[in-house]
């Protein structure tokens, strides 16, 4: 049986947050190298996933963003710099989308917690 899923900023009430390893240790910009994830939904074919992700400050140069992803910042701050040099800052309450293949610099300037929906 399927039903609507309420996403909670505090993570899934039954499974909570677990360690994540999307960011390389060398990309963290402070002593804090924490990164966690809390999954709320994954489609049967694993092409869509929804949840909450939190990560300490880091900076990554991404040649081609690997997925289509929509995000809403819960807390913290992120600066995305496009390949043309345009920088945009996203803070709590901001929602944005990154299309698959986008080249950018992803820089978390304050520990970031976000809701995400990924389509592969």
Image (cartoon, grey):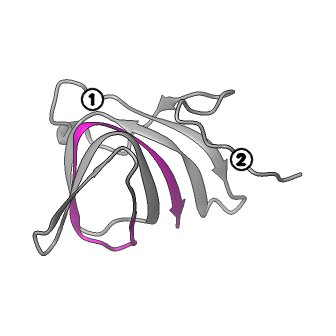
The residue wearing badge 2 is 5
Image: 81 above or below 39: below
Q: Of the residues tagged 2 and 1, which is closer to the observer?
A: 2
Q: Tell which circle, 2 or 1, labels the residue nearer the N-terminal end.
A: 2
Which image quadrant is residue 98 in?
A: bottom left
Which image quadrant is residue 35 in?
A: top left
Q: Is residue 62 visible?
A: no
Image: 77 above or below 1: above
34 on left or right of 83? right
Badge 1: residue crowd in 10 Å (few <14, some 14–19, many ≥20): some
- Locate residue 117, reporting x and y percent: 53, 57
- Locate residue 63, reporting x and y percent: 23, 67
Q: For the residues labelled 2 and 1, say whether their Cβ atoms are less than 8 Å apart.
A: no
x 89%, y 51%: residue: 1
Which image quadrant is residue 22 in?
A: top left
3 on left or right of 110? right
x 14%, y 69%: residue: 86
SS category of the residue bearing label 2: loop
Using the image as rendered, state which of residue 4 and residue 22 is in the foreground. 4
x 44%, y 51%: residue: 72
Badge 2: residue crowd in 10 Å (few <14, some 14–19, many ≥20): few
Q: Is residue 65 magenta?
A: no
Using the image as rendered, state which of residue 114 and residue 103 is in the foreground. 114
17 on left or right of 77? right
Magenta span of residues: 97-120
SS category of the residue bearing label 1: loop
Q: CA distance from mark 2 to mark 1?
A: 30 Å
The residue wearing badge 1 is 33
Image: 2 above or below 110: below
- Locate residue 61, reporting x and y percent: 18, 58
Image: 43 above or below 31: below
- The extreme right residue here reads 1
């Amino acid at each position: 049986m399927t039903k609507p899923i309420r996403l909670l900023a505090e993570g899934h009430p039954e499974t909570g947050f677990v360690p994540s390893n999307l960011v390389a240790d060398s990309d963290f910009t402070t002593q804090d190298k924490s990164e966690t994830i809390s999954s709320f939904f994954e489609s049967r074919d694993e092409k869509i996933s929804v949840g909450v992700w939190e990560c300490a400050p880091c900076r990554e140069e991404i040649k081609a963003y690997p997925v289509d992803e929509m995000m809403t910042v819960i807390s913290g701050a992120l600066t995305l710099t496009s390949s043309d040099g345009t920088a945009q800052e996203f803070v709590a309450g901001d929602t944005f989308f990154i299309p698959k293949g986008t080249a950018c610099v992803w820089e978390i300037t304050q520990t970031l917690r976000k809701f995400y929906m990924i389509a592969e």
